Image (cartoon, rainbow, N blue to C red):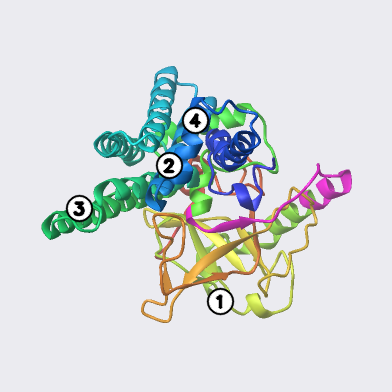
């Protein structure tokens, strides 16, 4: 399965077995039901009894069963992607508990309190891990949290006819829990995104040295946990297949060399500003983009001397050019892949609204907020002009190398 396919953007590699297990659950249960219906499973066995109980259960209990079983299979398969034995045992234990509670609920035995306690404990554990940076929230983790929040809602909200005060407290409590969980996940996603560009120098230096020892590639990724950063940015990578041919490798090398030569005049930020480049964000950071509106509509594609954007590292009163960004004029039109799988183009999904400030940010659960529309930008491609471990076509520039470049070759912003 291609790790850069649009489907897998935002999904941690170690969580993919759990995702597959969740998708397989309906098929497995359907086969089990078919075996019971055709008499191939003993009518007096537990499987047949559970199936009959499920068929007779009210809708809310059926939903609860699905939610608990989904969480169960996810937790049971999570150890396949985690090497920590202690954490794996906790996953297995919680998975077994969720399955047991689903069967207990179907059997008509008390389940509400036990289920609520387990759900709260699982959610708290996930928030601690995500909130302290031990693990980045990805789409599988977020979706599982949504499943568990839904199950918790079925536990907390009493059936109609109960006392109004109890229903009100339960409803308020559920809303509060949902907001807290969403807020922590949201903060964790943004923190992980920023950490890609602002890791501690010592940690980033070690990572850079490790990557440097492994050789210089032209199609690698510039960050170790790109699934979060790319998902938070709404990145859509164009799918590619196969290895690059000799001609494509040559084309990629020639484009990188021509781009480095073409933007050399913009090593001085003032020269770029004189030619119409304007900052699209505050003048501080390791990836400040400057747009040139005229070049974005001049019908010139992959012109090394007129890239649509430039990227600078800016800090301490200095700026240094890191690379260029080529951008298509129209959304949905693919950029020329002169280097095949090496020269990867990508687009961004953006949340747009008519209300101020005109745009929205990705919600804590990976979607655009209500009352906003999802718009896709034209395709674009980075070409980094500084030497770094992952080469000129990496997803992002290595922060250590960007800092080094700024320290060695940064030019004063104020003359």
Camera-near label (4 vs 3) is 3
First of labels 4, 1 by sequence position: 4
The answer to whether one can see residue 196 in this image is: no
In the depicted structure, whether residue 64 falls above or below residue 103: below
Where is residue 100, by image quadrant?
top left
Image mark for residue 78: 4
Instruction: Report, in whole angstroms, how far the alpha carbon at label 1 lies from the one at label 3.
Output: 57 Å
Do callouts 2 and 3 mark residues in contact (Cβ within 8 Å)?
no
Q: Residue furthest left?
A: 165
Question: Tag 4: Cα neighbours inside 10 Å, few (<14), some, or many (≥20)?
Answer: many
Q: Position of residue 312 (x, y in %)?
A: 51, 58
Question: Which residue is identified by label 2?
Answer: 65
Residue highlighted by disc 3: 170
Magenta part of the chain? 232-252
Labels 4 and 2 touching (C-beta < 8 A):
no
The answer to whether 344 appears left or right of 53 in the picture is right
Q: Residue at x 54, y 33 (%)?
A: 14
Tag 1 residue: 276
């Amino acid at each position: 399965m291609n790790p850069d396919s649009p489907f897998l953007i935002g999904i941690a590699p170690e969580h993919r077995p759990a995702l597959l297990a969740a998708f397989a659950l309906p098929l497995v249960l359907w086969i089990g039901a078919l075996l019971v219906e055709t008499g191939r499973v003993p009518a007096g066995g537990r499987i047949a009894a559970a199936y009959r109980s499920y068929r007779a259960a009210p809708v809310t209990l059926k939903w609860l069963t699905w939610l608990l079983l989904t969480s169960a299979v996810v937790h049971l398969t999570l150890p396949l992607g985690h090497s920590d034995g202690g954490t794996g045992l906790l996953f297995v234990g919680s998975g077994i508990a969720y399955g047991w509670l689903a069967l207990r609920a179907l059997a008509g035995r008390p389940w509400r309190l036990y289920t609520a306690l387990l759900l709260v404990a699982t959610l708290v554990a996930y928030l601690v891990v995500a909130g302290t940076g031990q693990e980045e929230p990805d789409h599988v983790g977020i979706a599982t949290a949504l499943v568990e929040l839904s199950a918790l809602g079925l536990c907390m909200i009493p059936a109609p006819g109960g006392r109004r005060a109890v229903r009100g407290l339960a409803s308020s409590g559920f809303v509060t829990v949902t907001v807290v969980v969403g807020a922590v996940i949201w903060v964790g996603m943004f923190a992980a995104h920023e950490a890609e560009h602002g890791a501690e120098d010592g940690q980033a230096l070690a990572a850079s040295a490790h990557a440097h020892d492994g050789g210089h590639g032209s199609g690698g990724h510039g960050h170790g946990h790109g699934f979060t950063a790319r998902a938070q940015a709404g990145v859509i990578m164009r799918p590619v297949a196969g290895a690059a041919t000799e001609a494509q490798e040559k084309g990629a090398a020639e484009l990188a060399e021509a781009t480095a030569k073409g933007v050399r005049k913009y090593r001085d930020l003032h020269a770029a500003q004189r030619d119409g480049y304007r900052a699209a964000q505050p003048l501080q950071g390791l990836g400040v983009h400057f747009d040139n509106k005229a070049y974005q509509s001049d019908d010139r594609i992959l012109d090394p001397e007129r890239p649509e954007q430039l990227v600078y590292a800016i800090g301490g009163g200095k700026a240094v050019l890191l690379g260029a960004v080529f951008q298509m004029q129209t959304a949905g039109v693919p950029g020329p892949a002169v280097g095949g799988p090496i020269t990867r183009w990508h687009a961004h999904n953006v949340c747009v609204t008519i209300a101020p400030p005109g745009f929205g940010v990705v919600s804590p659960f990976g979607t655009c907020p209500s009352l906003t529309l999802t718009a896709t930008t034209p395709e674009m491609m980075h070409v980094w002009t500084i030497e770094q471990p992952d080469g000129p076509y990496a997803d992002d520039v290595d922060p250590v190398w960007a800092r080094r470049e700024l320290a060695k070759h940064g030019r004063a912003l104020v003359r």
